[in-house]
Image (cartoon, helix red, strand yellow):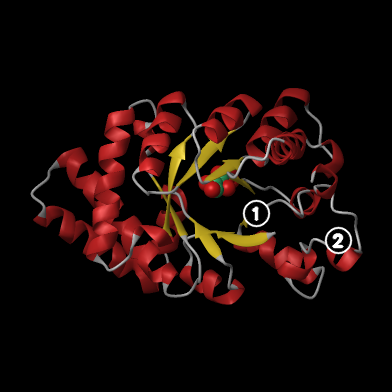
């Protein structure tokens, strides 16, 4: 399992040394709320003003530049890729999504970052998946996010996207609120959804990688050890690390520190 940090927090990425990192607008805002990175926000706004935009256009430009500035910084630390998310208000507009992605790619290029180090996070709507299909043809790899179902996963795989991020926690949150009960990892509906998608992909030989995302506790993460990738918040990395010699060891294919049978193995 490739360990990915679900954060834009540069210090946390330095501490945990993941292979990749994933960001989204709220994680980016959290990252630059720390005093030592607050100047990123000022620089992004100054740059956006220089582009001549006003109102929502200015905010969009600043948000995109901020994502790229943080992404650039993260790439100095991780050996792999940064996932940068497209504004989710564009989720049902394929053309606008494509235009925004090309803008992000240009901004990254302006900072010396090639497409091979970027994954573009796009919502797994019909329009988003079709845009990702086209972007993949252009050599821009995508990470389909906000994925909650097998139907979305099947369309994404058929579209030939590089990576999907099926969510765990948001499914579990919904079931928990609906049924008023907690779920052990083995019965957690979010975990079961990702396991089902993973097994389907492997049994059909899809090349698209599966990265479990949106975790609420380490039980969910351990239940998915063996998955291609898992994106984990620094707080949960800390908890995993406290239970074992390292996060990587915890998620090792041989069952890690607890010599568990990886629940994902039977699918292969
Ligand atoms: C990662 O790619 C996702 O943006 C993240 O895991 C979502 O997690 P959340 O459900 O806690 O927002």
Q: Is residue 171 above or below residue 255?
A: above
Find out if the beta carbon at label 2 lies less than 8 Å from the nearest ligand 1 atom: no
Residue 255 position, x and y percent, is 86, 61
- Which mark is drawn over residue 147? none
Residue corresponding to mark 2: 255
Answer with left or right where residue 182 lies relative to residue 100: right
Which residue does the image show at 50% across and 71% down from the upper left?
A: 78
Quarter where residue 180 is shown: top right
For image coordinates 67% across by 33% down, the residue present is 171
Q: Nearer the viewer, residue 3 or 200?
A: 200
Distance, label 2 to label 1, CA atoms, is 15 Å
**Mark 1 residue element:** strand
* C-beta proximity under 8 Å, tags 2 and 1: no
- Classify residue 212 as left or right of residue 49: right
Q: How many marks?
A: 2
The numbered mark at residue 230 is 1
């Amino acid at each position: 399992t490739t360990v990915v940090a679900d954060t834009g927090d540069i210090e946390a990425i330095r501490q945990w040394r993941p292979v990749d990192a994933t960001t989204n607008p709220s994680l980016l805002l959290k990252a630059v709320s720390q005093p030592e990175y607050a100047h990123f926000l000022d620089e992004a706004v100054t740059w956006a003003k220089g582009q001549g935009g006003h109102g929502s256009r200015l905010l969009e430009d600043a948000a995109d530049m901020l994502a790229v500035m943080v992404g650039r910084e993260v790439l100095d630390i991780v050996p792999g890729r940064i996932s940068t998310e497209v504004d989710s208000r564009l989720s049902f507009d394929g053309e606008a999504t494509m235009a925004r992605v090309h803008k992000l790619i240009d901004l990254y290029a302006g900072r010396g970052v090639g497409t091979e180090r970027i994954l573009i996070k796009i919502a797994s709507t019909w329009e988003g998946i079709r845009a990702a299909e086209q972007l993949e043809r252009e050599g821009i790899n995508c990470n389909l996010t906000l994925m909650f179902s097998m139907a979305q996963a099947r369309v994404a795989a058929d579209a030939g996207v590089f990576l999907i991020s099926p969510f765990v926690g948001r499914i579990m949150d919904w079931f928990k609120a609906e049924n008023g009960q907690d779920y052990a990892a083995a019965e957690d509906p979010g975990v079961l959804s990702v396991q089902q998608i993973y097994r389907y992909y492997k049994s059909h030989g899809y090349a698209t990688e599966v990265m479990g995302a949106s975790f609420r506790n380490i039980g969910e993460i351990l239940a998915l050890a063996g998955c291609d990738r898992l994106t984990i918040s620094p707080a949960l990395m800390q908890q995993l690390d406290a239970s074992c010699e390292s996060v990587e060891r915890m998620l090792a294919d041989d069952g890690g520190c607890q010599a568990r049978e990886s629940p994902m193995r039977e699918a292969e």
